[in-house]
Image (cartoon, rainbow, N blue to C red):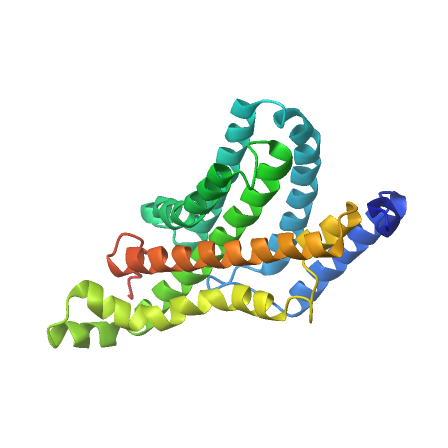
Amino acid sequence: MLAAAALLPVNTTLGVFLAVLLVATVAVAAAAHLADGHERPYARAVALAGLRAAVQLAAVSALIGWVVHAVPLLLGFVLLMFAVAVRTAGRRITDDRTWWWAALPIAAGVLPVVAALLLTGLVPLKGVALIPITGILIGGGMTATVLAGRRALDELRTRHGEVEAALALGLLDRDARLEIARPVASDALLPGLDQTRTVGLVTLPGAFVGMLLGGASPLLAGAVQLFVLVALMAVQVVAVAVTLELVARGLLRRVPRHVP
């Protein structure tokens, strides 16, 4: 069985390669003038994301061996992951103070799945198993929440006149918003659906490869990866549904732009 160290040795060559790759990525983003809706360039964001990832992964690598031995520390680490996901998702969706509502779709998707895994004994209350699985699910819920929230609010702003027309026809505010936002918010499920549909044919995701490198049989690795993909779909479907409802009810919103 191929050892992980043989596949990707941690040495000076790896460090130099990653640095060059990050610089090249930033250069392409800058040359293409990639920017968000507020004309903020993504080149700087890419550079900061790469540097933050290096620092954060170094810190997690040092801490994870410590927190796995105590349940309170383990649960505290999981809560930290959740809090960061909520802050990241909320601020990606809106600058309004309603950003904290992003906690609801992520929690609604992740908590039932994790609780079921713990109650059935499929995942023990140990960091070695709980942290990576919970992290994958929280990350999937965060991504789905961001995509659904941003697309729904963008669509409502662009098609505001259609919402007003629906209200004039007698629809409730929630129902009018749902009619406009639902199709685009639902597209947040496409990345997860495509990953699940093409697994083994286009890509071999991280859980599968990680299990193989750890010495597991291909059958066990495939079973674990299947579980991760199905659990992710469940989390993301719930996250998108809850996000859509929050947007439709006006609980998750943006500060209106004033046109001079």
Residue 46 in view of the camera: yes
Residue located at (47% from left, 65% from top):
189
In this orientation, which residue lies closer to the viewer: 38 or 1? 1
In the picture, measured across the screen, residue 127 lies left or right of residue 248, that is: right
Q: Where 85 sits versus 159, above or below?
A: above
In this orientation, which residue lies closer to the viewer: 232 or 255? 232
How many numbered callouts? 0
In this orientation, which residue lies closer to the viewer: 44 or 62? 62
Which quadrant does the C terminus fall into? bottom left
In this orientation, which residue lies closer to the viewer: 77 or 257? 77
In the picture, measured across the screen, residue 5 lies left or right of residue 55, that is: right
Answer with the quarter of the image where residue 70 lies.
top right
Residue located at (18% from left, 77% from top):
165
Residue located at (88% from left, 44% from top):
12
Residue 44 in view of the camera: no
Answer with the quarter of the image where residue 124 lies.
top right
Residue located at (61% from left, 26% from top):
67
- Residue 140 lies, in percent from the top left, at 52, 53
- Residue 110 lies, in percent from the top left, at 45, 46
Q: Where 242 sits versus 155, above or below?
A: above
In the picture, measured across the screen, residue 245 lies left or right of residue 129, that is: left
- Residue 53 lies, in percent from the top left, at 66, 45
- Residue 191 lies, in percent from the top left, at 54, 66
